[in-house]
Image: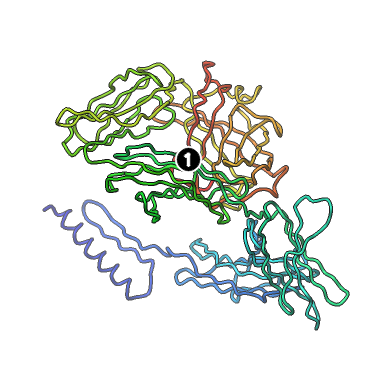
Amino acid sequence: MTARTVLTAVLVVVLGALLGLSATVAHSSAAFTSASRTGQSTVRAAADWTPPKVTMTAPASTVTGTVTLSATATDAESGITGVEIQYQPAAGGTWETVCADTAAPYSCSWATAGVADGSYALRAVATDQAGYSAASSSVNTLVANTSTVFLADPGDALRGSVQLTATVVHSGTSTPAVSFEYIASGSTNGKWSTACTAPSGQYSCSWNTAGLTGDYDLRAVAVTGSTTTVSATRTEVLVDNTAPTVTMTDPGSPLSGTRTFAATAADAHSGIAQVELQYAPTGSSAYQQLCVVAEEPYSCRFDTTRLAGGTYSFRAVATDAVGNSTTSTAVTNRTVDNTVSSASLEDPGAYLSGIQTLRAVANSTAGISSVQIQYAPTKGATFTTICTDTTAPYSCDWSTASVADGTYDLRAVLKDTQNRETVSAVVAARQVDNAPLRGADVQTANGGTTVGRLDARDTITYTYTGQIAPASVIPGWDGAQATSVVVTLNGTSTGSVLTVGRTAGAVSNLGSVNLRQTYIRSGRTATFNATMTTSTVVVNGVTRSTVTVTLGAAISGAGSLRTTSTGAAMVWTPSAAVVDLAGKPASTSPVTETGVLDREF
């Protein structure tokens, strides 16, 4: 062992002792320095590595005029440099600063006359000497300077019996009679209907929405003697008492190996929240879960060897965003048989290019001699072998450039040790497309205030596999400068579809993006001012063009936007009007967003 190695070992022991002492003595920012003939080493302890602790003190449940807001904050290491007290509408929005205080007690006056009456969230943000900051949990209060009746938020989407609640302030010694009213959104007859009437002395009652489906405006009404007071109206509240539609896809028979089970489902109002695929032995009503799928396509791969051989029924249960559900008609008497051999080919995707890895799953009680993976032109009778694999996992790389662009059927053929063949189900009509330019990926980023909702400063970035001519996106654009565009968001029954154009209603050559979740009401449209820029990135030595669109202020339809809480993978369908630097058009093959499922924007 060299002298340097010995010295290093000693330093490690000393450092361990110092760190051990830190668990029993006050924190320090001490430094330990050693010197030897081979150089100098220094070990330092961080001055502060934890954020402060901060708590917002809740004010009265209802406030008027000028009120005092306060918070408490501590930091055990470096100390507090300041505390900001902030507010935002309780329904969400931008946090605004009420005041900043640099010394305890942290408090300030809030002139509530400067904000509109309504519910607000309050929080405190503390920063320590090391620059770490932390935000407290929020507390709520109701500002009531001029209004006397407030309707609590019943939610964006409702069904069945819904509890409606009002807050009444400045009512004097009399207790008003409170009722709740509704009217179809956009109605021109001005005739409000009674949703429910609160019992005497109470401000809450249950509204039976049975028989109603659509968008409605709601308000609370308080009557004291001959005086009637009406709350602010909550507009476009979706009432959905219509169950979704759902159909179980016939999985075929006999079933063996790992198979795809699927259903189709639709809901014209609140949208599909999930589809559960189920099975039961023939003659049994005790259905069990195959899988639960939250987005289209409503399908999953299931290993049927987990089921005992026999006949089964399969069905699907669709549930919409407010809890309405429908059970499909069962597909009955489908045989599961895994007693001899089974083979299946994993679906490589609808669009194939370049080197594509194909994978098969095979099982045989007689043992497996080999598995072949084959292709044929769609609906062709003659299959060509791509590869033969004799050991699991059974896979091979297919150079799709070896065949002409077009659609192909794929299958796997198992040969057992007795030379018997089992042919998998065909994965049909997979598109081979080796156009030189195609979409590579599409991603969004949240730059606004609310995750899962389109806001100003949110971005969407389109990435191509090569460099593009900017003028093919929008005529006359050279890509050197940002250009103004308009983003249009349309609500459909299968997701919200985003397009970009020079003006509202116009479509650029970027194509369309289905966000695969409900970011706007079905049948509604919203538009945003936006700017578009282009740049390049290098991936595996290849220069690629990216086009980034940054949202600005909403032009129209902001009231129809919705906040999505469920992640999904976007699908971008490029336009062939975009060309590369050689003038060759882009592929129109759809591109699915890469990465983990997340909420967009």
Which percent across, then down, holds residue 520? 63, 46
Q: In which quadrant of the rendered view does residue 156 lie?
A: bottom right
Viewer-proximal residue among 111 and 188 = 188
Image position of 459 (left or right of 464): right
Q: Is residue 255 above or below residue 283?
A: above
Q: Secondary structure at mark 1?
A: loop
Q: Is residue 204 above or below residue 564?
A: below
Viewer-proximal residue among 579 and 576 = 576
> Which residue is outermost to the left?
1
Which percent across, then down, holds residue 42? 31, 58
Q: In which quadrant of the rendered view does residue 221 lie?
A: bottom right
> Which residue is outermost to the bottom?
173
Viewer-proximal residue among 186 and 87 = 186
Q: Residue at x 28, y 56 (%)?
A: 41
Viewer-proximal residue among 452 and 247 = 247
> Which residue is outermost to the front?
283
Pointer 1: residues within 10 angstroms few (<14), some, or many (20+)?
few
Which percent across, then down, holds residue 61? 67, 75
Which percent across, then down, holds residue 96? 66, 60
Q: Residue at x 23, y 61 (%)?
A: 12
Q: Is residue 105 above or below residue 316?
A: below
User: Total of numbered circles in the picture?
Assistant: 1
Q: In which quadrant of the rendered view does residue 375 lie?
A: top left
Q: Mark 1 = which residue?
A: 297
Give the amino acid at mark 1.
Pro
